[in-house]
Image (cartoon, rainbow, N blue to C red):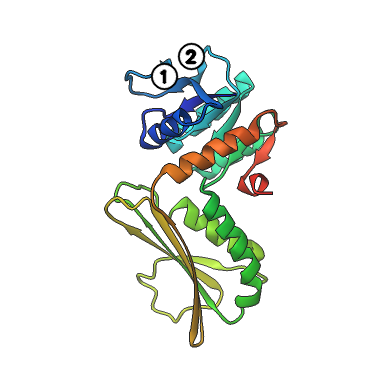
Amino acid sequence: MLHIILNGCFGRMGQEIQEEINQNKELTIVAGIDRTQQEADFPVYQTLADVTEAADVVIDFSHDNSVATLVDQCVQKKLAIVIATTGLSENTKQQIDKASQMVPIFYSANMSLGVNVLIEALQKITPALEEDFDIEIVEKHHNQKKDAPSGTALLLADSINAAAEEKKDYILGRSGQENARSKNEIGIHAVRGGTIPGEHAVLYAGKDEMIELKHTALSRRIFANGALKAGEFLKDKKPGLYSMSDLLK
């Protein structure tokens, strides 16, 4: 049985997590954390510091501004944590890296198993295509998403760059770009509208041919499922910084 503290329990993703857990007898929420107070099947606190229940892992779907404090509190309580919140600052990422020396931390800019398999595919084909193909990324999300480009779009771009022989510059949109496209770049474009959970397309455009790899999220449930798999993966792990590439091995 995996005992979970759910941070952001009343948010959209927190509710998705609860629905997934209700269908799995091997998972249970021992406590929730949220700024709002509502009725729940478990005790709910304002901060992790207030939680008295024992747990195996904290799963975080909250706001980027609260992650740094949460990580500090996990270190103090010696709790493993899955960080599924996106849009983190570089300072917070550095803090996560430092904290992972003391507690197990699982962090990914996207918790979808499919997206992370897509990343592996991109890294395999990029070396063969980069010389003759231009690379563009188009991401689409709902109209309430605040960060642009998405963390996943940047994750895809970073994975391409890691496999490329010649490192690419990121061009965010093309407004004001009066010069012809450079070979040494990846264009990243953001679309916001409606209730789109998330779509990412990577286009390799060559002379008279194109290759497109696309991932479409049909619901937020896939991110909840990935976060719970990450939580199970972290149980009994030693301190360290883990990612989807470790889970997929």
Image position, residue 26 (x, y; %): 56, 27
The amino acid on which the numbered mark 1 sits, given as a three-letter code, is Gln
The amino acid on which the numbered mark 2 sits, given as a three-letter code, is Asp
Q: Quadrant of residue 138?
A: bottom left
Image position, residue 17 (x, y; %): 44, 33
Q: Is residue 186 above or below residue 30?
A: below
Rounded to the nearest whole Å, what is the CA distance between mark 1 and mark 2? 7 Å
**Residue at left offset 36%, top offset 72%:** 176
Q: Is residue 125 above or below residue 237?
A: below
Q: Are marks 1 and 2 in contact (CB under 8 Å)?
A: yes
Q: Is residue 215 above or below residue 212?
A: above
Residue hosting label 2: 50
234, 182: nearer the viewer: 234
Q: Quadrant of residue 163?
A: bottom right
Image position, residue 157 (x, y; %): 54, 61
61, 63: nearer the viewer: 61
Image position, residue 190 (x, y; %): 38, 60
Q: Given the current orientation, which residue lies at the most extreme right position?
A: 238
Q: Could you tell whether 185 is left or right of 100 in the image?
A: left
**Residue at left offset 38%, top offset 32%:** 15
Q: Note whether residue 87 is visible.
A: no
At mark 1, the secondary structure is loop
Q: Note whether residue 202 is visible.
A: yes
**Residue at left offset 58%, top offset 56%:** 117
Residue hosting label 1: 46
At mark 2, the secondary structure is helix
133, 118: nearer the viewer: 118
